Amino acid sequence: MTSAKSNLTIHLIQPYLNAIDVDGVIRVEGGTNYEAPGILMEQLSFSDLHLDYFMNTQCELIKLNSGDNLTITVVGCSNLLGKSILRFSKRFTEHVSKLKEKGYELKKSKVHFIVYWTKVDTDNEIRIVLPEVEFVRNGG
């Protein structure tokens, strides 16, 4: 008999299973309020970046490797020589603003993935960088 047949533990945030009434079910609710983390790491995706901008940065992207540090700029990221590499999308810029209201500041960025993207109605594959970014909470 596997452990799931004799003992099953489910951790939920939402009350999806509260309506289910089964003999032997033990419900435990944690009432602890945790402090917001001091550091948030996010891996950006296609929707977080202005993809067309990569068409102008292909020469610089060839020189990058996964794990390379990037410099945060007002509109995106540049390589360590100051050459612009990527631009953030409007959606991600709004996300950064919301985190700023919560006391977080965008501090670090590095190359996480280098992938190819094909724009609709074209056959050209464009190299793009999907970065990992770090937000640090003020005082954290």
Image (cartoon, grey):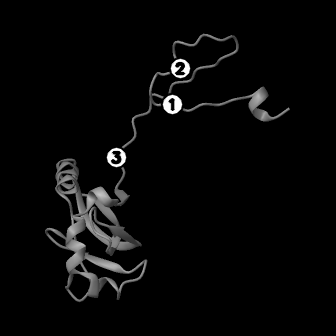
Locate residue 58, reporting x and y percent. 27, 82
Camera-nearest label, 1 or 3: 1
Mark-to-mark CA distance, 1 and 3: 19 Å
- The residue wearing badge 3 is 36
Locate residue 69, reporting x and y percent. 34, 79
Q: Quadrant of residue 1?
A: top right
Q: Is residue 44 above or below residue 79?
A: above
Q: Is residue 130 visible?
A: no
Residue occupying the point 32% across, 60% down: 46
Q: Earlier in the sequence, mark 2 or mark 3?
A: 2
Q: Residues within 10 Å of mark 3 (few under 14, many from 20)?
A: few
- The residue wearing badge 2 is 17
Q: How many marks?
A: 3
Q: Earlier in the sequence, mark 1 or mark 2?
A: 1
Q: Residues within 10 Å of mark 2 (few under 14, many from 20)?
A: few
Q: Is residue 30 visible?
A: yes
Q: Earlier in the sequence, mark 1 or mark 3?
A: 1
Residue occupying the point 27% across, 58% down: 48
What's the residue type where badge 1 is placed?
Leu
- The residue wearing badge 1 is 12
Q: Nearer the viewer, residue 111 or 103?
A: 111
Q: Quadrant of residue 86?
A: bottom left
What's the residue type where badge 3 is placed?
Ala
Q: Nearer the viewer, residue 19 or 100?
A: 19
